[in-house]
Amino acid sequence: MTTAISVSGLRKAFGRTQALDGLDLTVTTGEVHGFLGPNGAGKSTTIRVLLGLLRADGGRAELLGGDPWRDATELHRRLAYVPGDVTLWPTLSGGEVIDLLGRLRGGLDPKRRKDLLERFDLDPTKKGRTYSKGNRQKVALVAALASDVELLILDEPTSGLDPLMEEVFRDCIARERQDGRTVLLSSHVLAEVEALCDRVSIIRSGRTVESGTLAELRHLTRTSITAELGSPLSGVDTMTGVHDYSAQGNKVQFEVDTAELDAVLRKLTEFGVRSLVSQPPTLEQLFLRHYEVEA
Amino acid sequence: MNTLVGTGSLVRLVLRRERIQLPVWILAITGIVAATAASFAQLYPTVQSRVEFAASIANNPSVLALSGPAQGLDTVGGMTEWKYGAVACVLVGLMAVFTTVRHTRADEETGRHELLGAGVVGRHAKLTATLIVVFGAGVVYALLIGLALAGQGLPAAGSFAMGLGIGGSVWFFSAVTAVAVQVSSSSRAANGIGGVVIGAAYLLRAAGDSAASDGPRWLSWLSPIGWSQQMRPFADERWWVPALYVAISVVLLGVAYGLVGRRDIGAGMLPERAGRATASPALLGTLGLAWRLQRGILIGWAVGLAVMGGALGGISKSLNSILDSSPQLAEALQHIGGQQSLVDSFMAAILDIIGLAVSVYAIQAALRLRSEETTMRAEPVLAGSVARIRWAASHLLFALLGTAFLLAVAGTVTGLAVGLSQGDVGAQLPRLLGAAMVQVPAVWVLAGIATALFGLLPKLVSLAWAALVVFLLIELLGPLFQLKQWALDISPFTHLPKLPGGEFTATPLVWLVAITIALTAAGLVGFRRRDVG
Ligand SMILES: Nc1ncnc2c1ncn2[C@@H]1O[C@H](COP(=O)(O)OP(=O)(O)OP(=O)(O)O)[C@@H](O)[C@H]1O
Ligand SMILES: [Mg+2]
């Protein structure tokens, strides 16, 4: 298993703002990696460093086996980038921009280009200044997805797309993964992350706070349990990993660390389970826990 | 009236955003007018000395074309108006155009307008607020210039008449721009229209002022800059002339407000045509992209300079006809320096001004790099397999070769026009083309300054414009202020051989090219090392 992106201890300051403060990120070749964090966390800054647009103050960054700053020109042949805020040249048509960006990267596949234009329902003859936000985003997406590259770096690529187009986008990314391409996807859309990403990294204030597969992350959170038992429950409230325990006659309600779930359920069955509702943690809960500033 | 809701708070917003620029413009131009008057008072303290000065220029059409009609030259005030009135009108015109566009069209493009438009703000409020501030600046100009001159003991009537001419020009050019922003498709185009109108106003009065008494002197009356001079400050003022500014401004504003309701925010009046579905092979890489982005401005400049060159041919003809119709005058002039040298010195001065004008293009073309960067359009390009130097070089190629091309156009058309009107194209074309081309290295220095700032101090790129203004003032006013040679030497234009007519020396040109190379290299190296964005 090779790594497409490997970043450790990355630091970058803008004047007095410390945008990146020892950030770590590892993206394995062939995976779709979700890159999450609250506004201003440093996602776009990390991506710009990886693209060689910004020079890091410290730390190490490696991209496709090269140095993103020194080898920028060669590396850019092998990757495609979609910025979060796409601005187009007012007098160039969307089709011209797609071709131009493709050529600057070393060419694109005309068949794929045609197919993507159709699927995204994009009129390539309109001039840059007349596109809506979502359509500008589609121009950049088509330019990136139509090229034959190893790595896609996408910075909030769906922030302007309608739900129908969002669906098309997911479809395209799924196909990219099948073809063995690596994707770094920065996003605020949790459903999108859940549907697409093999692994995610969550950052806050320029530092990585969590990284792993969604299953692993879920593992670190709590499942809530509501149960009705044959006889009053005892001994569970003191078990490790059980929180917010409340009991009313034969009915109990509590939360349990997902890692301790097995042991707690075994205990419950000793009292005769009549009904059981278990709620896995939602992704929202998962992220909110990481996004919220620790008091 | 609900289309004007919110105007008051928008006026405050415009004033806040202009709190530095506007006062600097006003104080700088007022200060220069006041200093010009003071230095004339010192240089020509007696009526006798001023009459002698007036006699030396009264019949020199080339000098009249550059400055203005010879009137009231026996007074210090009249000399000030003559020397600086037209130049001041051009400068305040630029201020009026830039400021009006910045708060209307440019805001629409950045989306700032929508942010405001969605609040409780009427449809006409933004334009009205902008015009209130810019027209107000015109009033301030009129008063301050009047006070600054009257304060030096010059006649109050003339002082305020000169102030009114300059303030009236602010109104006129702001009103023209109010229309331009409605019909043009971008702020760049609106600025361009404003610039063309200013240039045309200056040329019309140059043609009218230098015309023979039976020639087309009425041309001056077609120009708002001409009006400021036809108001005759310090020379028996015509107080009805300012009414022209008011009348034409009212008409133009009527047109502008009529158009506001007819177009959508962000769109021009002209409908958008569909573009190509695929890129042509010409749009192959960074150079093709730079050509697409720069060609409009380059072609516009080339057309403008060609028109100007043609107009100069006409002036040179009237120059000759004056000398033909008045043998005594011709004899007197030949006594001073020969007929050829009179026309030559006129042409040399004009080409110098063309060189300064083309510098505007050179800076504009080089700073395209910065505007591509700040609008984030550079990002997707540089995220492609494009070396930074290659991207920068594609645009700089237009700044440098475009400059040479434009001066070649100006020299060729001027040479043809003068040659045809004098019947010796074979002699005039190469002379004037050569005289235009010696400007190239001086203009390049400005492109170099812009590039160096872009690479090393990207937040301060507008200092390139400041450098141009300094060089312009040194060129136009240096001799008047009797600046020391080292101060004159700051401007690259000082070092150029005075062609046609003067002696050609290559050494200063080589130096200017060397300086350009050094500045450009410093800028490129700086850009390669710094953050983009
Ligand atoms: N060019 C810059 N100059 C100064 N500060 C900057 C610059 N670019 C980013 N920053 C700051 O760096 C921090 C990180 O910004 P960044 O754009 O990387 O956040 P982000 O995670 O992409 O946020 P979002 O989710 O809003 O896109 C912010 O505090 C931002 O204000
Ligand atoms: Mg971002």
Image (cartoon, coloured by chain):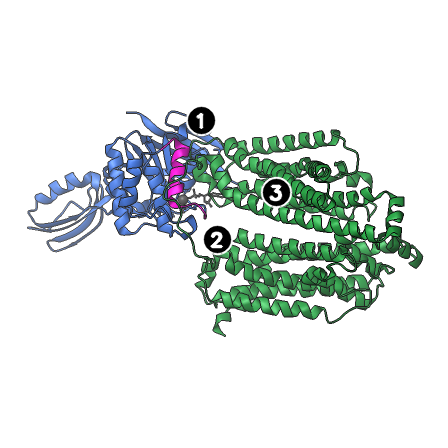
Chain colours: A blue, B green
Within-10-Å neighbours for mark 1: few <14, some 14–19, many 20+: some
Mark 3, residue position: B363
Predominant secondary structure, magenta span:
helix
Amino acid beneath label 1: Asp
Q: Position of residue B257 (x, y in %)?
A: 52, 67
The chain carrying label 1 is A
For residue B120, side relative to residue B398 (left or right):
left
Amino acid beneath label 3: Ile
- Quick check: do tags 2 and 1 share a chain? no
Q: Is residue B328 magenta?
A: no
Determine whether the beta carbon of the residue marked 1 sits less than 8 angstroms from the nearest atom of ligand 1.
no
For residue B524, side relative to residue B322 (left or right):
left
Q: Position of residue B33 (x, y in %)?
A: 77, 56
Instruction: Using the image as rendered, state which of residue A34 and residue B174 is in the foreground.
Output: B174
Amino acid beneath label 2: Thr
Q: Residue B409 is drawn in which quadrant? A: top right
Please, is residue A12 above or below residue A249 in the view? Answer: above
Q: CA distance from mark 2 to mark 3?
A: 22 Å
Mark 2, residue position: B110
Q: Nearer the viewer, mark 2 or mark 3?
A: 3
- Looking at the rendering, the stretch of residues picked out in magenta corresponds to A90-107
The chain carrying label 3 is B
Mark 1, residue position: A71
The number of discs equals 3
User: Counting residues from the N terminus, which is met first, the one under dot 2 or under dot 3?
Assistant: 2
